[in-house]
Image (tube, rainbow, N blue to C red):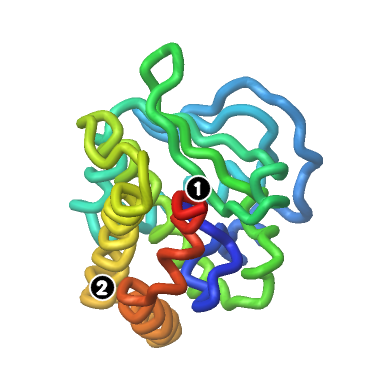
Amino acid sequence: MQAIKSVLKISGVLVAVIAINMVGTANAAASSPDFALTANITLAGEYTQNDVVFVQENLAFLQKYLPTWYQYVTDAGALTLTIDEAEGAVGRAATAKCCDAQGRGVITFGFHFGQSPDDAGQTSEAQRVAFIGTFVHEVTHILDQRAGRHAKTNFKSCVAAEKSGLEKQLQVKRDLAGANVSGEFLQALNRQTRTEASALVSRDLWQQYCGAFEK
């Protein structure tokens, strides 16, 4: 699970400007037939054409620059991506659940891509970095759940589960820093990785994610 309003603003679901430029203004969201993004990844529910293009662009970006991480997300078993703005309204940028009745992992984003109020002012480079990190984070939860790891039953197990996702989120961003990307992209990576490395040892972060288990 990715919280939206952390003190250190560690997470977010963001859209690249290139996606908006390609399709113009966002189409009205409506339930549409499931859209296969890859052999294993499907977009379902109420989504716009901008949502489709955004995820396609970022999967292609990941495949080009970090093919090992592209395989990590595409080999994680069948995944369905959905959007539920009610999740965003209560402070969740993304959540993951394994599995539905068909055995698919489900990742639910709290906003249409690019419409998270926390992230609206970021550059397209920062937006792309944050989405890739969030997506890897949630895929990690699906993989852990498939393997029976990190069931959240108390504060300690909740921290272990979230730490697993956050460590992968940080790792993919550090790996991206070694790719042949633009200076603006590197600036965004450096800002986010510094913040997230600090957050991993922050009691405030774990209280935000797992404090409910102490009540």
Mark 2, Cα crowd under 10 Å, few <14 / some 14-19 / many 20+, is some
Q: Residue at x 35, y 83 (%)?
A: 194
- Which tag is nearer the camera, tag 2 or tag 1? 2
- Using residue 67 as the reference point, say whether residue 18 is left or right of it: right
Q: Residue at x 44, y 39 (%)?
A: 96
Q: Which residue is mark 2?
A: 174
Q: Amino acid at mark 2?
A: Arg
- The label shown at residue 131 is none
- Using residue 189 as the reference point, say whether residue 65 is left or right of it: left
N-term mark: 2 or 1: 1
Q: Amino acid at mark 1?
A: Val
Q: Residue at x 41, y 78 (%)?
A: 192
Element under disc 1: helix
Report if the CB atoms under discs 2 and 1 are less than 8 Å apart: no
* Gap in angstroms between the C-alphas marked 2 and 1: 21 Å
- Using residue 210 as the reference point, say whether residue 159 is left or right of it: left
- The label shown at residue 55 is 1
Element under disc 2: helix
| Residue 16 in picture, x, y percent from top left | 56, 63
Number of marks drawn: 2
Q: Residue at x 41, y 58 (%)?
A: 132
Residue 191 seen in render = yes
State the residue in front, 169 or 20: 169
| Residue 211 in picture, x, y percent from top left | 48, 58
| Residue 88 in picture, x, y percent from top left | 66, 51
